[in-house]
Image: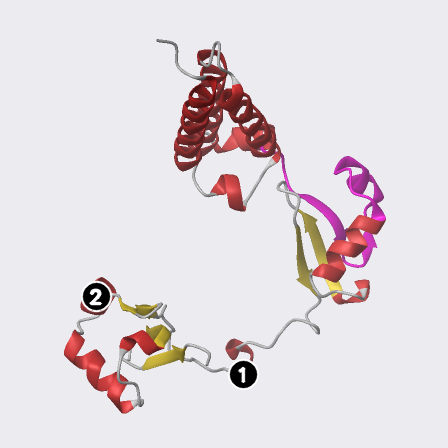
Amino acid sequence: MEMPEITKVILTSLLSAAVLFLIAKVLGHKQVAQLDFFDYITGITIGSIAAELATELEEPMKPLTAMIVYGTIAITLSIISSKLPRTRKYINGTPTIIMDNGKLYRSNMKKAKLELSEFMMMCRQLGYFNLNDIQTAVFEYNGRLSILPVSEKRPMNPADMSLSPEPEYICAEVIMDGSIMGENLHRMGLDDKWLSKQLAAQGCKNPKEIFLGVCDRNNKLTLFRYEK
């Protein structure tokens, strides 16, 4: 008995989503967070092939094979650039200095295919409305702009004041959306009894009242309650 067409569409769609998910997991978060030129092309291509696979009922193996080939190429190039750093400039490109010491490099802007208006917009997005506040501007290979401000405009840090503050650590979430995160709690050497005392001390009877609870290395519990 031949399978109904709607069932075939559902199955090929599920197959497409599963393969796309697996390729994305193998490629890692870089595909989402930091797109370079080849990642951008690969992402669009694999997405297009995945859409074709979802509706290809006669020969789904063709787009499936193409997805696997593109995924393999991306993984291979990632391994090559990791093992052979010198190849990165050919695969990913290189950063380009757009501005340095008060001078704009028009030739570098043309090389990076960056218009002056785009450069000004990117500066404003980073909080630099006056180019005199910029010491060096570098156009990275992933299309983002990195700026080094002039020394008079950079934020003051503890070293400027000869201070040595205590190191800070990431807080652990011990309550999320009303649920106790037991693993995080135990990793910090704490238990439910300690948490109950801390909740009571802050006038909370039940963890269900808490949207988010975080604890630092000094066992200080900070609570964010649900909005009433």
**Foreground residue among 55 and 131:** 55
Kindly identify the amino acid type of the residue bearing the numbered disc 1.
Met
User: Would residue 214 appear left or right of 108 to someone viewing this image?
Assistant: left
Question: In the rendering, at what x and y percent does residue 18 appear?
Answer: 39, 30
| Figure quadrant of residue 17 | top left
**Foreground residue among 168 and 161:** 168
Q: What residue is shown with label 1?
A: 161
Question: In the rendering, at what x and y percent does residue 53 appear?
Answer: 50, 21
- Note whether residue 216 is visible: no
Question: In the rendering, at what x and y percent does residue 133 appear?
Answer: 76, 67
Q: Is residue 106 magenta?
A: yes
The answer to whether 1 is drawn above or below residue 36 in the figure is above
**Residue drawn at the location 42% of the way across and 80% of the way down:** 165
Colour mode of the rendering: secondary structure
**Crowd class of label 2 (few under 14; some 14 to 19; many from 20; radius 10 Å):** some
Q: Secondary structure at mark 1?
A: helix
Residue bounds of the magenta highlight: 92-116
Q: What residue is shown with label 2?
A: 182
